[in-house]
Amino acid sequence: MDPVLYGYMLYGVSLLTVGGMYAILALGLNVQWGFTGLFNAGIAGFFGIGAYTAAILTTNPHTSHIGGFQLPYIVAAIAAMLIAGIIAFLVGKVCLRLRSDYLAIATIGLAEIFRLIVNNETWATNGPRGISQIPRPFENLPEPINQFAFLGVVLVTLAGVYWLMEIARKSPWGRVMTAIRDNETSAKAAGKNVETFRMEGFVIGCMIMALAGALMAHYLKFVNPQTTDPLLATFIVFVMLVIGGSANNKGAILGAFLVWTLWSASEIVAPRLLEAIGMADAGIRSAYVRIFLIGLLLQIFLQKNPQGLLPETRPSSPGKNSS
Amino acid sequence: MAEFINFYLIPGLVLGSIYALGAIGITMTFGILRFANFAHGETMTLGVYIAWSLVQLTGVKSLLAILLVLMPVSMMLTIMVVLLIDKAFYKPLRASPVIILVIASFGLMLMIRSVTQFSWGVQLKTILPGIQPRLQLFEFFSFPLKHVFIVGGALLLMYAVHYVLTYTKIGKAMRATSDSPELARLTGINTEKVVMATWVMGAGLACAAGVFLAVDTQVDTMMGFKILLPMFAAAILGGVGKPYGAMAGGLVIGVAEELSSYPWLGDGPLLEPGYKQGIAFAIMIAILVWRPTGLFKGKSF
């Protein structure tokens, strides 16, 4: 194959792979923000919990951090989701009875505390140097088939999460969720236990985020505290969901692929543009320009089109569903 | 004893005064505009860089001149930027659900930070170069002179806040709006004016807190974000919407953070200094569990 074409193909595969993992994150956030109206500002924390759990449970024995469990991928992913779920439950217990801002503050705090722990508990996480040599499914297959195979793993996981979330959305459970989001008082008056439903939405969302984190650890084959960077693991997910369309699972996926493509394409284009206009340090500074622009894009959507590209569609009435 | 005061208590009071100033803005925005402003830390960072640029431009080297002349100018410039930000980004969302404003502020946090990093770079800078004189009291108490200026300056500014809130018309309107926005509107208080006053107070104090922090430590593009959580914790500890609560909360959290690494038991620090930042979070969670209204009976939504 032509090497240039081959390069484009691999770039396309990596774009879809990372985009797919972001789509899973966006679906997780959609349960919380889209359907339940909960603002989780610490996506990076739950994502990081997933990444580190999967890393520690699947790596070979190593002298600089705990490990050597060499568990199968699926077991590690389930463990990652369970741990994230338990932590989400504890955070939810404290914050969900209060107004949504408190959850935002507590979750961003939790994500920062997680970074502190990961940086300081060197015996477990190798501190800032991180955990390397994380195995990846199908990595022993020949290039580039292994890349396609892992992309397949991501897309199958994404499809599974999407399918479950669509069932949830159309179920009575999903309808109660949106009812609480839109009018808490009337949902309460209808006899719904608001706090329990919120807790369920929050925990499920965090578990999905941890699953995305586990996939990312295998994909990068490396995790360190930078993996839980609030910009790339929290903020951009919000941008994806708001632009794609909150409360719409298809919108979440669309937004994830769209924003991720924009973000990585701008990584190539922006430095050259800045260089062309003769700016010093164009390489470093272009990163800030990109962050600013993606922030501006979010603000424009919040003001002009808060529904996003694919607005919410309500499931049909229960009568039709049961037939 | 001397060691305890010199290296733990005084740094704690210094840090606490800085948190207190920052937390006033957070709690007032929370009380009056009704949202948790995630961009508050970056406002502080921006103010510091404005002050740093003024120091470079004027070549002023005396701490007193920086605090008395350049800091007020930086506060004014920061306030102007924040008022423009309000006009462009928060005002169009006033009618939106509160949580949309929180997301907008989260986005602004990263936008302001990227502007700061773009314009000034990420290398550490100092506002006050060179070795600073120390103050010696009764043989064993010894601390940098700048700490006296920081705590003194913070106390003065807090008194100014108290004066504005107690004796001026706009200050009373602010407290009324914070206590009950509907009732305040009914009595004919101009909400937009109160909102503007809130930004003015919050941004000015954030800039001052940032400059104090920069004088105490260094100038860093992440400095505001690093103390965002302690400021939120201080606002919640003091009771949301309660400026005096925020002052008390800030002091408590600053002192608690520094005292946490004192060797209370045995020889080693009670808590590894690496976990100092965790203290604010722990206090915040504790207060949310046992007394969400905070010490000063603020709002609990």
Image (cartoon, coloured by chain):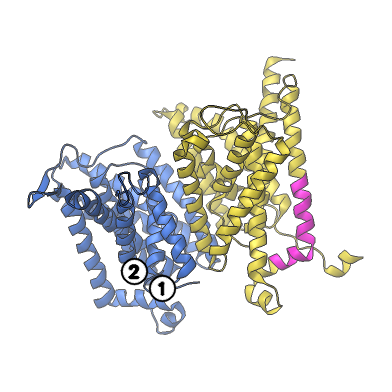
Q: Position of residue B140 (x, y in %)?
A: 11, 49
Residue under the image location 38 percent in, 55 percent down: B230
Q: Which chain is yellow?
A: A
Q: Position of residue B284 (x, y in %)?
A: 43, 61
Is the N terminus of chain A in the top left, top right, bottom left or bottom right quadrant? top right
Is the C terminus of chain A in the top left, top right, bottom left or bottom right quadrant? bottom right
Quick check: can you spot residue A277?
A: no
Q: Please give the range of residues in magenta.
A: A160-177
Q: Let me know if residue B73 is in the magenta part.
A: no
Mark 1: secondary structure: loop
Q: Which chain is blue?
A: B
Residue behind mark 1? B298
Task: Classify residue B75 as left or right of residue B299.
Answer: left
Residue under the image location 53 percent in, 63 percent down: A94
Quick check: can you spot residue A102?
A: yes
- The residue furthest left is B138
